[in-house]
Image (spheres, rainbow, N blue to C red):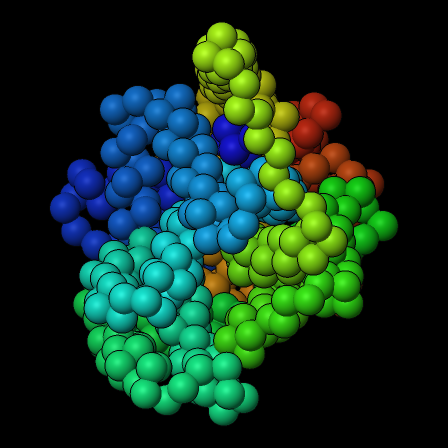
Amino acid sequence: MSARGVADPDFWWHLRSGELIVRSHTFLRTDPFSFTRFGHPWVNHEWLSDVLIFSVYRVAGFGGLIVSFAAISAATLLLVYLRCPGRPYVAAVFTVCGAIASTLMWGVRPQMFTLLFAAIFLLILDRARGEPKILWWTVPLMLLWANLHAGYALGIALLALSIVGTVLDIAFGRESWTSRATGLRNLGLALVACVAVVAVNPNGVRLYTYPFETLGSKAMQSYIHEWFSPNFHDPEYAPLLLIILGILVGFAISPKRVSPRDLVLLCPATLAGLRSVRHIPVFVLIAVPILTQLWEAWLQSVGATIRTNRGSVHRLFEKRLLNAVILGTFAAFSIVRVALVIHRQPQTEAQHFPAGATAFISTQRPPAPVLNHYNWGGYFIWKLYPDYRVFIDGRADLYGDSFMNEFAASYYLAGDWRKSLRTWGIRTIVLPPDAPLVTALQSQPGWRRTYADSQAVVLIQASSSGRSD
């Protein structure tokens, strides 16, 4: 399930960023890729992820990236499964349901590191209730996490919410102060240490405020699909709905009462998952073990037991042989599946990105500056930089809400939609054929179409000839 072709629009600028860092041996502190923000300060919070992505690509190509990030996704769900109590097959069913709900966000992208580290943190927090010293592993993990992705803030939140939940457990009499005092102290110290090591990154203390700026961006939540709320009219969100309904029914019928600590984690995770598609996998990490414990307790209350077969040695041999055949078949299927995904990567790239238009620009070299689609900026950075710099790409935090709104106004012909064209002296436009801006300009004498296919149209000013930087 986790083997996916490379289709994330941001992947390409991550790849180029990693290449520049590796080849120059320096951090990128200002924007080198766009002409609209060239030289502006850039918080490249994913610099280490970029380096890893490029390093794997250089050694093993797209196949290595697909396999590596599939392994990260699978490991994340394995950690969720390990946190589920009770019978293995009950935990497996709910874990697979959670995996299906999470697949929308899977792919070759730095966010997968955040999901993996969050799963590790949750496992540590669970195990620390019996072994408080294990909490100190969160500190080196946080140091690594903060250099891989700004989602490190989720780890800080998990520690803080665990402290609040533990205090509530004590307040409601589920735990005694004497039994939890050491754990609370270690939680507090681990939280302070984790917050402190976040600053050990190329961006320094600037990284403390970055996650809040991203979460507070209205433009990102208005224009970027993964920041939208899930639409339950869409079948792809049915697994998420089933998990939520399963928890609500479990609350009603299960004799198990969820602890305040679990509720303190579950409530904000549910709110985040309902607010943004991007946060559904985070909800799954927290919700699936809680869902499992509720239904496991209900199964026990109605007398459901695990049936065992203590037959003869011959029967045991038959079962083991059957298991070996099933596992071998599954392994073969997995290998074929991964090989097929890797083989289809060129088609995946052509399906999601304007490969034809990019080849046309590379050979025919229309005049710059070029106004490009938001989702294609990263692809152009990988394919056309440094010959062309982009107008915009997936680094929405770099461009800011005002610029995003200005681009949207031009794209959808809202307000003074010509403003961006005038301000930046745009001479070439590369957008989808159905873009309102393309429709408007094609009917005017000042622009002419020089390339078109099912994905992209290239328009240049009629008076332009040759390329100009």
> On the rendered structure, is 75 left or right of 195?
right
Furthest-right residue in this view: 233
> On the rendered structure, is 343 left or right of 149?
right
| Viewer-nearest residue: 429 or 403 | 403
Residue 468 to residue 328: above or below: below
Q: Quadrant of residue 39?
A: bottom left
Q: Residue at x 53, y 40 (%)?
A: 88
Q: Residue at x 77, y 47 (%)?
A: 238
Q: Residue at x 37, y 89 (%)?
A: 177
Question: For the C terminus, which image quadrant?
Answer: top left
Furthest-bottom residue in this view: 171
x and y percentages locating residue 275 in the rendered image: 67, 66
Q: Quadrant of residue 428?
A: top right
**How many badges with numbers are in the image?**
0
x and y percentages locating residue 324 in the rendered image: 47, 13
Question: For the N terminus, which image quadrant?
Answer: top right
Task: Decide if residue 383 is in sight here.
Answer: no
x and y percentages locating residue 318 in the rendered image: 52, 9
> On the rendered structure, is 148 left or right of 464?
left
Residue 30 to residue 89: above or below: below
Task: Decide if residue 322 is in sight here.
Answer: yes
| Viewer-nearest residue: 234 or 213 | 234
Q: Residue at x 27, y 66 (%)?
A: 131
x and y percentages locating residue 175 in the rendered image: 44, 82
Furthest-left residue in this view: 25
